[in-house]
Amino acid sequence: MGRVISKSGAIRALGAMSGTSLDGVDAAVVETDGHEIFGFGPSAYRAYSEEERATLRAALGHWHGPEVDTSSELVTRAHAEVLSEFEEVDLIGFHGQTLAHEPRGRGTLQVGDGLGLSQALGLPVVWDFRSDDVALGGEGAPLAPFFHFACAKWIGAQKPMCFLNLGGVGNLTYVDPSFDGPETPGALVAFDTGPANAPVDDLMQARLGLPMDQDGALARDGTVETGALELFLSEPFFNRMPPKSLDRNDFSEMIGLVKELSDADAVATLTGMSAAGVVQGMEHCPKPPSRILVTGGGRNNPVLMEMLRVSLDCPVGPVEAVGLDGDMLEAQAFAYLAVRVARGLPTSCPSTTGVSACVGGGIVSAPARGAMVGV
């Protein structure tokens, strides 16, 4: 059972993230007051089985129906398994699994039962982080930028810098740490850069029955098809001003652009497209960043990282270079955001999602006889 959560002082929050790469559940503890990071706690990972990944993949793009219901049960169960391993936790931030994202249309859908998870674990759970932002005209993504701002403060950054997350979709956060708070105009700019690992993973699965291009081995043996790359960059998405966001499958036609290529050339070209989206996105930074810190699975792909290094005018490296955990940064982000929601603080603002005003999105569910939130 959790402790009573007060309006001030550090909270030991546990965040969980199941990303668009569909690899598994990340869980990590952050100690924070919703403004400052005081420390990082233990973390854990629960991989999805091949059968579970197939179940989630079959539900992608669906808004309702048996596939969605089955996926929700799977996601809730998998999270309960890994989150039950943690002790001395006050609050849980539960992102769930995104199946569909259409902020200018049907909204956004992250499956998983936050109330059921709260009852199962006996702890307050903050969930459904994106819906309020979308309802107020925002993109609902990316949501990690407020945490990135806190991370920039934690590492002692003095100059503008960027965090680049390369998951299934890529997203960039420009941080100016000279400002006092993340919601201050000028402190943050954030947006999705384009697809990252998802098209490569999908092609590897379809052609070779493999979940990913491990260590960029296949891309390294291929050649980027420049014609396909130019067609990719002609997509209207890249001409839109941020904030902007994507659904995992918005660029599914990318695989069609490389269907005539060999496996190696196709993977190299898709990897080049992911890098090119980031390079295009850098034009939206208010000032040249002093460095780019990369998180997410893409940072482990040496081919993708080298493409970024040779194309960008500032140092590019993994977040581990400053003592952060690139595997757990998003889970930590939702621990941090959960504390902000519990304390009535905003989790997104016009410069991060395009929302009409600063908003703290999320539902807080507590067990019938559990801890109280925000008292």
Image (spheres, rainbow, N blue to C red):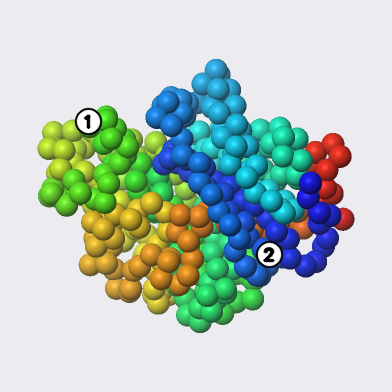
Front residue of 21 and 211 = 211
Q: Is residue 235 above or below residue 69?
A: below
Residue where numbered disc 2 is placed: 32
SS label for mark 1: helix
Q: Residue at x 13, y 33 (%)?
A: 260
Which quarter shows the C terminus? bottom right
First in residue order: circle 1 vs circle 2: 2
Residue where numbered disc 1 is placed: 207
SS label for mark 2: strand
Q: Is residue 151 above or below residue 209?
A: below
Q: Does the image show residue 360? A: no
At label 1, which amino acid type do we have? Arg
Q: Does the image show residue 82? A: yes
Q: Which of the 4 quarters of the picture holds residue 7?
A: bottom right
Front residue of 168 and 88 = 88
Q: Residue at x 58, y 22 (%)?
A: 69
Q: In x, y percent, where is residue 310?
A: 23, 67
Q: Residue at x 30, y 41 (%)?
A: 212
Q: In x, y percent, where is residue 131?
A: 63, 41
Apparent side of residue 262 relative to residue 74 in the rendered image (left or right): left
Q: Which of the 4 quarters of the picture holds residue 188?
A: bottom right
At label 2, which amino acid type do we have? Thr
- Cβ–Cβ below 8 Å for labels 1 and 2? no
Q: Callout 1: few (<14), some (14-19), or many (20+) C-alpha neighbours within 10 Å?
A: few
Query: How many numbered tags mark residues here?
Result: 2
Apparent side of residue 206 relative to residue 367 in the rendered image (left or right): left
Q: In x, y percent, where is residue 278?
A: 34, 58
Measure how far apart labels 1 and 2 are at the Cα level: 45 Å
